[in-house]
Image (cartoon, helix red, strand yellow):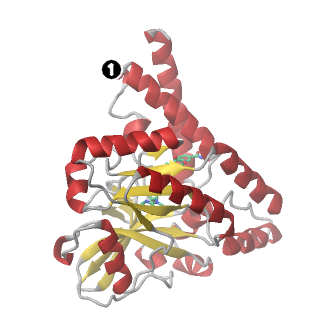
């Protein structure tokens, strides 16, 4: 492709991806399946790789999430809430493993976790008390959804240690609650939600917490943003600590010492996927040692010490079609 054609296509892709981002992140109402969004994003990444001067700082490849809704108070995140790099096949995972080993050596332990299909939230605790909850927003500024988050029963309002820290997790709507909600919406002649992720996002970003309270949302927490006074040295220890002080973490996580073990774990989880009571859209692989995480650092948009393996597109499409048929 010549430079001019690449430039034209880059502009087209910016425009499309910005529209889709807005629909998904701000309106909670996507018009295309995630696989289509991911395909266009990969096309843009490849063009930017081939023509580096076409990569601008406002490119969708450099940005996290979307703008915040004006109706909410804004929260400036003390630690940015980033996205995750994507892997779509075994080769992408092997490339990730190679990059990690090149940077920090061969003594690696990974933690493999489910990628819960909900929305990222941040929970701030002061001396053990839940004081503020926020959406990811654009990664730097999120929406204050404290009162809505308080309606999720698995979020402790007071934890078992007087810690002051920020916890990150995925708020989601269990499959059953999603089905019930859409049945109700159809009875009331309201538009059903496209999938549990959008239903969760639409419910948690309600101005009236009474609506969120009726939606049966749940959460799995998956990290501590500022480890400060906790003294933990590994991601897996952070998860154990979170569990000990009263949070709900996902029990399907496993430790792996090689990429072969990671691949086997992915296979195993994929087989379980349909039987889970909540939606997952992939599997997250994280370097366990926090020292190694620090050495690996971040790109503009995501940590270099983690990657999200996304399930193949056909499955995502099937999932969407199934849901459409079942409502
Ligand atoms: P992402 O969904 O690929 O990954 C990052 C997110 O994963 C985190 O922010 C967190 O919320 C979540 N997550 C779930 N479980 C986790 C765990 N165990 N550990 C860490 N994080 C976990 O990236 P993104 O930036 O949130 O969203 C981009 C994706 O959203 C796209 O790849 C696409 O699938 C979808 N999207 C779709 C459209 C559309 O129009 N259909 C538009 C925009 C984005």
Q: Dot 1 lies on which element?
A: helix
* 278 horizontally vs 250: left or right: right
- 247 lies above or below 113: below
Q: Position of residue 78 (x, y in %)?
A: 24, 62
Residue at 41%, 45% in the rendered image: 85
Q: Quadrant of the C terminus?
A: bottom right
Q: Which residue position holds label 1?
A: 53
Does residue 293 appear left or right of residue 192 in this picture?
left
Task: Determine the residue positioned at 68% across, 64% down.
Answer: 274
Q: Nearer the viewer, residue 201 or 96?
A: 96
In front: 238, or 265?
265
Image point (36%, 74%), residue name: 239
Count all numbered tags in the image, as a single digit. 1
Residue 299 seen in render: no
Q: State the residue at coordinates (57%, 69%).
A: 203
Q: Residues within 10 Å of mark 1 (few under 14, many from 20)?
A: few
Q: Quadrant of residue 285?
A: bottom left
Image position of 317 with respect to 223: above or below: above
Q: Position of residue 176 (x, y in %)?
A: 70, 74
* Position above or below: 171 against 93: below
Taking the image as shown, residue 203 lies to the left or right of residue 164, namely right
């Amino acid at each position: 492709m010549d430079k001019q054609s690449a430039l034209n296509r880059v502009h087209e892709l910016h425009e499309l991806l910005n529209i889709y981002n807005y629909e998904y992140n701000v309106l909670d109402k996507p018009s295309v399946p995630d696989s289509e969004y991911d395909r266009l994003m990969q096309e843009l990444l490849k063009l930017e790789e081939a023509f580096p001067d076409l990569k601008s700082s406002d490119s969708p490849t450099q940005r996290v999430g979307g703008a915040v809704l004006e109706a909410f108070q804004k929260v400036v995140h003390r630690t940015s809430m980033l996205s995750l790099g994507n892997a779509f096949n075994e080769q992408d995972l092997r490339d990730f493993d190679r990059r990690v080993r090149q940077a920090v050596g061969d003594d690696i332990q990974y933690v493999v976790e489910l990628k819960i299909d909900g929305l990222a939230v941040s929970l701030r605790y002061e001396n053990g008390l839940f004081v503020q909850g926020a959406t990811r927003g654009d990664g730097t500024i999120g929406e204050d959804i404290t009162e809505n988050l308080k309606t999720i029963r698995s979020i402790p309002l007071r934890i078992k240690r007087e810690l002051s820290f920020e916890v990150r997790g995925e708020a989601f709507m269990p499959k059953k609650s999603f089905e019930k909600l859409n049945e109700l919406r159809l009875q009331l002649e309201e538009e059903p939600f496209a999938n549990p992720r959008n239903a969760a996002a639409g419910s948690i970003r309600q101005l009236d917490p009474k609506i969120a309270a009726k939606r049966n949302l749940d959460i799995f927490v998956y990290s501590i943003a500022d480890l400060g006074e906790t003294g933990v040295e590994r991601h897996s220890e952070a998860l154990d600590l979170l569990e000990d002080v009263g949070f709900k973490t996902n029990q399907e996580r496993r430790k792996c010492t090689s990429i072969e073990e990671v691949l086997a774990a992915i296979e195993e989880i994929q087989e379980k996927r349909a039987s889970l009571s909540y939606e997952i859209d992939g599997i997250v692989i994280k370097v366990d040692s926090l020292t190694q995480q620090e050495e690996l650092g971040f790109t503009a948009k995501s940590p270099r010490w983690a990657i999200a393996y996304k399930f193949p597109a056909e499955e995502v499409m099937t999932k969407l079609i199934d849901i459409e048929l079942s409502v």
